[in-house]
Image: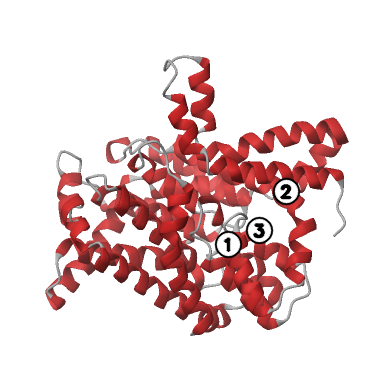
Amino acid sequence: MAFTTLELIGTIFFAVAVIHTFMVGKILHWSHKFPKDSMTSGVLHLLGEIEAVFAIWASLFMVVYISMEGWTSAITYQNSLDFTEPFFIFAIMVVCSTRPILTVARQGILELSTWIQKILKTPAVTTDMAVVMILGPLAGSFITEPAAMTVTAFMLNAMLQKESNKLIYALIAVLFVNVSIGGALTPFAAPPILMVASKWGWDFNFVFTHLGWKAAVAVIINALGLVLLFKNDFKKNCITLREVENRMSGGQKSIPWQVTLIHLAFLAGIVITGHYRNAFVGIFLLFLGVASVTTRYQDSLRLKESLLVSLFLGGIIQFGAFQKWWLAPLLSRMDDVVLFKGATLLTAITDNAALTYLGSQVDLSDASKYALVAGALAGGGLTIIANAPNAAGYSVLSHKFPGGIKPLNLLIAALAPTAVAIVCLWML
């Protein structure tokens, strides 16, 4: 397992960043012990923002890089990186968090939930929650996982009215797992599949028949299991989508259908061109202009939150190339069962798209290819860094976690839905 000094340092910095993510809650707690306007409080608060963790350590690593290799080498390395995904998630988060997009998504799910309630005579709150947790993640196979995560998280945020520590961790854990596997119906929506689909010749039919239907079964089981286990908590702490709709419509301008249609067109344009940065950035910039003249039908654009999520993903990408020296040999030496389990576990500390990309650089059998991708999908909800869209979901729901999210609590809460995903993707 040959490596250079710089690769070793890059891995050490990456490991420190991972450890840092598990300490953000404690660091935020420390920041409150100092005067609010003091520099110490400000620095600790910054260190306690999980979205900034990888960007901070990536910046420090680049200082070391420049000191060892020089400015020219550092710039060359930067130019070799592909930051399309962070740019895309920034654009899609901003667009999907607008009032017209959220309203049409909420109303569509409300109609379906209302129909189910009439047929099955089920309670409104739990039915709404089940439909949101099933339809939202599965929609990620068509509108991409970041878009599905953003829209679903906003609906959950509107429904969850009272803080319940146990409920919110279970909710976000199922959300992360379901979105990670929910994009597996198609070859272009889930980042771990997208990274390998073209190279390995995985078309729509292959992805759906080998991964998609199994993922859909797991999504449904996880959503229904969550609703059944926490039905009393949902009744106490949540409101129905109908109540959300009534509150949202009260005191707000009704949105003309033309405005909604224009927003949907921009969303479709960004999704379709999502792999071509220059194209979707141009569409997004035009969207910002349109948003500025439709302010009466808008809430404040979530530019800051979206930028933080992009910063988080950019930091992870910065470290990616320096993990190849140990990840690639490790993956190549595993048999299929061990590879599936190993991929699931490694995803917790390595973005699952980066994991499958590195795996695509290794000569693997067809069975090993499946094991790698299935494991990466199954483990996508174990931590915030496991799947790129997780950061977007946490950004929307972060205020539901007083003192910040505790990664260990998330890991524990995600074990059950992850187990369901493992069983469905491997045993079915």
Residue 382: percent from left, percent from top: 50, 58
Q: Which numbered dot is residue 366?
A: none
**In screen coordinates, is 38 left or right of 250?**
right
The kind of secondary structure element at disc 3 is helix
Amino acid carrying mark 2 in the image: Leu
Q: Can see residue 92?
A: no
Please rate how many residues cluster around mark 2, counting C-alpha atoms within 10 Å: few if below 14, some from 14 to 19, many from 20.
few
Residue 217: percent from left, percent from top: 40, 78
Q: Give the residue pinned by disc 3.
A: 354
Q: Can see residue 76?
A: yes
Q: Give the residue pinned by disc 1.
A: 191
Measure the alpha-carbon separation of dots 2 and 1: 16 Å
The kind of secondary structure element at disc 1 is helix
Amino acid carrying mark 3 in the image: Ala
Residue 306: percent from left, percent from top: 48, 41
Write the residue at 66% across / 36% down: 57
Tell me how the rendering is colored: secondary structure
Amino acid carrying mark 1 in the image: Pro
Write the residue at 68% across / 38% down: 58
- Quadrant of the image occupied by residue 6: top right
In this view, the mark in front (3 or 1):
3
Check if mark 2's residue and mark 1's residue have beta carbons within 8 Å: no
Q: Give the residue pinned by disc 2.
A: 81
Write the residue at 43% across / 47% down: 394
Write the residue at 50% across / 46% down: 91
